[in-house]
Amino acid sequence: MPYEFLIGLRYLRAKRKSTFISIITFISTAGVALGVMALIVVLAVMTGFEEDLKDKILGTNAHVVVLKNTGHIEDYVPVMEKLKRVPGVVAATPFIYSQVMLSTGPNVSGVVLRGIEPKTDLQVTNLGKSLVEGTLGALETTDQTGAAEPAPPGVIIGRELAKNLNLSVGDMVNVVSPLGNLTPFGMVPKMKRFRVAGLFNTGMFEYDSSLAYIGIHEAQDFLSLGKAVTGIQLKVADVYRADAIAREINNGFDHAFFARDWMQMNKNILFALKTEKLVMFIILTLIVLVAAFGIASTLFMVVMEKTKDIAILKSMGATGRSIMKIFVLEGLIIGMAGTVIGVLSGLLVAFNLEAIVGFIQKVTGFELFSRDVYYLDRFPSQVVPSDVILISVTAILISFFATLYPSWQGSRLPPAEALRYE
């Protein structure tokens, strides 16, 4: 073992004449540990929120959407079969998209109406898993030949939308399309009566308050589309290769069609999350940087205290480089100790964050995390190993650079000058 390392450890263990240096050493170690712990916990929470948001987006929307430049896709079955043969595509389903109004007496709300094919939609989206009442099978068109009065077709709406319109399963609702029939008196909106067949809850207020689903054949009939659809939704094997698959479709298909992946359709919110995560990393790294100044201060005082020792070591043949190594190793030990403590405490908090938040709420009586506001059934926390490694390496590097100048100053101390007043 190098003697520089042994001397550095001895200086850390040695009883100092003044406890002031020991206090600064403890504060520096605690500062590094606090910064590392804060970084791990905050990035774990932000990653958890990001992943939870991605799950909700992908649960409601397809990974890739294929549309036609000139309008609706008339003969969509051959197009859908061709898309299924694209490498990486797992399943496909047609859909119809339109903006309509739902009305129940005095209550009116504008919504996005989606016509879906229940059997194939289950293979592409997670709408079936989001249902809290009813089933997607209720949207299937049934043969009612001979019925005295045909039952209204079914519609599935979000739970928030149901609250806004005061609706429950089994209630009737009017669907009004602004693209109605042209009459001598002008454009007359088209209206049809539907029965609420189910409620879904995705956890995203935007979706739960503005989406309504009906069967694809009912949508074609109501919107007078014939056999046409708005587009085709695709599910891919790897969601993070959806952009590459979309580019492949754009390059390999007729220019009449174009594909958009889920990241492109939600790039604003995903970019905002990534930017926020980066900014938080930079801000919290300043805590480690402040602690690094404490390490530098500690080393400056140790150098002044060990002036005699430095002179003796140099008189015995120690080089300036060896003296510098002693103090660099001493500062690194402080930084590494703080990093290890911070990583362990950060992981402990991140893995038990939900229990800790619940305990704090129970003791204080203050609700830190309202499920009604955030629409999450748990406090999201996800530790990414690469984030932990990046944080640890950053903290150690900052500690290392903080040791260089005071160590260099100690290595330049002339032996005769150091022993003049001894």
Image (cartoon, rainbow, N blue to C red):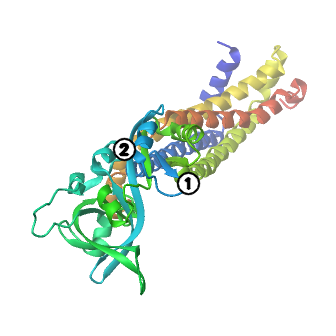
Residue 405 location (% of width, % of height): 79, 35
Q: Nearer the viewer, mark 1 or mark 2?
A: 1
Q: Residue at x 58, y 40 (%)?
A: 247
Residue 99 location (% of width, % of height): 42, 68
Residue 352 location (% of width, % of height): 37, 43
Badge number at residue 69: 1
Query: Callout 2: helix, strand or loop?
Result: helix
Say whether residue 338 is visible.
no
Say whether residue 66 is visible.
yes
Spatial CA distance of label 1 from label 2 is: 23 Å
User: Amino acid type of disc 1?
Assistant: Asn
| Few, some or many residues within 10 Å of mark 2 (<14, 14–19, 20+) | many
Residue 386 location (% of width, % of height): 54, 33
Left or right for 318, reference 93: right
Question: Could you tell me which quadrant the N terminus lies in?
Answer: top right
Q: Residue at x 17, y 67 (%)?
A: 170
Question: Of 295 and 165, which appears nearest the observer?
Answer: 165
Q: Residue at x 33, y 42 (%)?
A: 123
Of callouts 1 and 2, the N-terminal one: 1
Question: Of 85 and 294, which appears nearest the observer?
Answer: 85
Badge number at residue 241: none
Question: Of 13 and 346, which appears nearest the observer?
Answer: 346
Query: Callout 1: helix, strand or loop?
Result: loop
The residue lying furthest to the front in this view is 184
